[in-house]
Amino acid sequence: MNTLSYLTLFSGFSFLFFGIGCFVSKKMKMEFERYGLPSYRKLIGTLQLLGALGLLIGLGYSTTLQLSAAFGLSILMFLGFLVRLQIKDSFLLATPSLFYALLNAYICYQLLSVSRQLLL
């Protein structure tokens, strides 16, 4: 297994946890209220679960699925980072969303690089 696979597993399992948390965690419900986005909690949880499944299933079966999931999660987390800044959270509190945005952007970039090499 290579580094990209480990990063994909890390991100995939993280988003399984985060996605489930959107549905069952009282703390997560309060956080979405604090963000001013309580009506989007279940949608975001669903997107996180779909992204996690796309990363994990794509790891073994479909680079295109894995790439799409990484791209979607990077956008979702970048928007999460912007929400944190908008509500005046400290940069330290906003850092996890930025970390996951950059992690998934890196996974996406690496998958694109691998795909290009296979096509040449």
Image: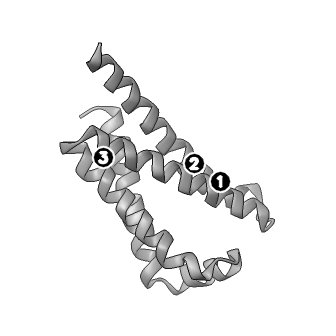
Q: Is residue 24 left or right of residue 94?
A: left
x, y (%) of residue 103? 50, 43
Label 2, label 3: how many angstroms apart (C-alpha)? 22 Å
Judging from the image, what secondary structure is the residue with disc 1 in? helix
Q: Residue at x 58, y 82 (%)?
A: 39
Inspect the image, locate mark 1, and give the three-letter code of the amino acid beneath it: Thr
Percent position of residue 58, x then y: 26, 46
| Residue 117 position in % (x across, y down) | 32, 17
Q: Nearer the viewer, mark 1 or mark 3?
A: 3
The amino acid type of the residue labelled 3 equals: Leu
Residue at coordinates 52% horizontally, 87% vertically from top-left? 26
Residue denoted by label 2: 99
State yes or no: discs 2 and 3 in contact (Cβ < 8 Å). Answer: no
Number of other residues with Cα within 10 Å of mark 1, as a class: few under 14, some 14 to 19, many 20 or more: some
Residue beneath the point at 28% across and 18% down? 119
Label 3 secondary element: helix
Q: Earlier in the sequence, mark 2 or mark 3?
A: 3
| Snapshot quadrant of residue 40 | bottom right
Q: Which residue occupies the extreme bottom position in the image?
A: 26
Q: Which residue is mark 3?
A: 65
Q: Which residue is the extreme one toward the right?
A: 88
The answer to whether the residues at label 1 and label 2 have Cβ atoms under 8 Å apart is yes
Q: Amino acid at mark 2?
A: Phe
Query: Residues at badges 1 and 3 in contact (C-beta under 8 Å)?
Result: no
Which tag is nearer the camera, tag 2 or tag 3? 3
Instruction: Identify the residue position indicated by label 1 in the image.
Output: 95
Left or right of 11? Residue 61 is left
Locate residue 100 relative to residue 108 in the image: left or right: right
Q: CA distance from mark 1 to mark 3?
A: 27 Å
Classify residue 103 as left or right of residue 49.
right
